[in-house]
Amino acid sequence: MTSVPTRSTASTSVSPPEPASRPLLDLVSRFQNRLEDGDRPGHKLISAGLAPQEHERAALEDRKRHLGASLAPATTDEDRAVLSRTVMALLGGFPTFGADRDDAKLTVSLIVRALDDVPVWAVQRAAGLFLKNLQKTRWNPERAPTAPQIRAEAKLVMLDVEVELHRLEQVLGAEIVDSETTEDERKAAVAHWNELKAQMGRSNVIVQRTDEEIARERAEQLRANELVERRDAEARERAGLPARNAFAPRSEAVE
């Protein structure tokens, strides 16, 4: 059984991550839409019948590792040398950077130290944006950018990758709650996955879900909601609290 394509090359501090494929984006969105809020901020639930299957989880985990590797800062001498050359080239593009050789080396060294938690590729992109005056960070283009400005712009460059990584972590870290998934539903899910894989190989067209699939997902979500409500009711009973008013906001915390 093949998995969803997540990348074709390795990701490092110097090389940015490959853009996510359309099938992978669809896969993440599908599972995100199945998530339910848990009993605390950031706590997500997903019905067992709607959770990623083994091959889907493997694809999501692989993409997560790929993105994580791309966000790693420079750790080797070679990567740090690339970072130093990038900073030197950026500063050298401005007439205000007219220090002597020793002062220039010291300035570059200090800036590189300030960027020790940023991947090289993000600094390279940020440098290109400064040179073209397309940066989002506030800056006086008559002077070379400072270390905080370069770092701020590099962090903005990384934002899309961090957002995608957060979405993956939400899906992979969601608590799987019990559901009464039947064998027929399980077989139907596997058949649907096999159909999606075949279509992924032929085109990038987004596959529309059938009414039956939507109804099945809604049923699973209702089961998950009922389980959460049942757990909440049991917790309230153990704590000696009255049954929750269905129309009241969830403001009471139950240990």
Image (cartoon, rainbow, N blue to C red):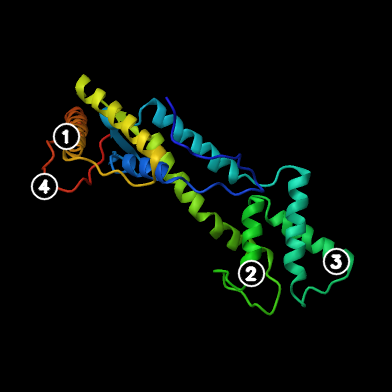
x and y percentages locating residue 118 in the rendered image: 63, 52
Residue 219 image label: 1
Residue that badge 4 annotates: 247
Can the viewer see residue 51? Answer: no
> Nearest the camera: 5 or 232?
5
The first of marks 3 and 1 along the sequence is 3
Residue shown at 16% from the left, 34% from the top: 219
The first of marks 2 and 3 along the sequence is 3
In the rendered structure, the answer to whether residue 113 lies left or right of residue 50 reads: right
In the rendered image, which quarter is residue 3 located in?
Answer: top left
How far apart in space, not on screen, are marks 2 and 1 (Cα)?
Answer: 52 Å
Query: Vertically, is 108 above or below 53?
Result: below
x and y percentages locating residue 246 in the rendered image: 11, 43
| Number of the front mark, 2 or 4 | 2
Residue shown at 39% from the left, 46% from the top: 204
Q: Amino acid at mark 4?
A: Phe
Judged from the image, the secondary structure of the residue bearing numbered disc 3 is helix
Judged from the image, the secondary structure of the residue bearing numbered disc 2 is helix
Q: Quadrant of the C terminus?
A: top left
Q: Amino acid at mark 1?
A: Ala
How far apart in space, not on screen, are marks 3 and 1 (Cα)?
Answer: 68 Å
Residue that badge 3 annotates: 103
How far apart in space, not on screen, are marks 1 and 4 (Cα)?
Answer: 22 Å
Q: Amino acid at mark 2?
A: Phe
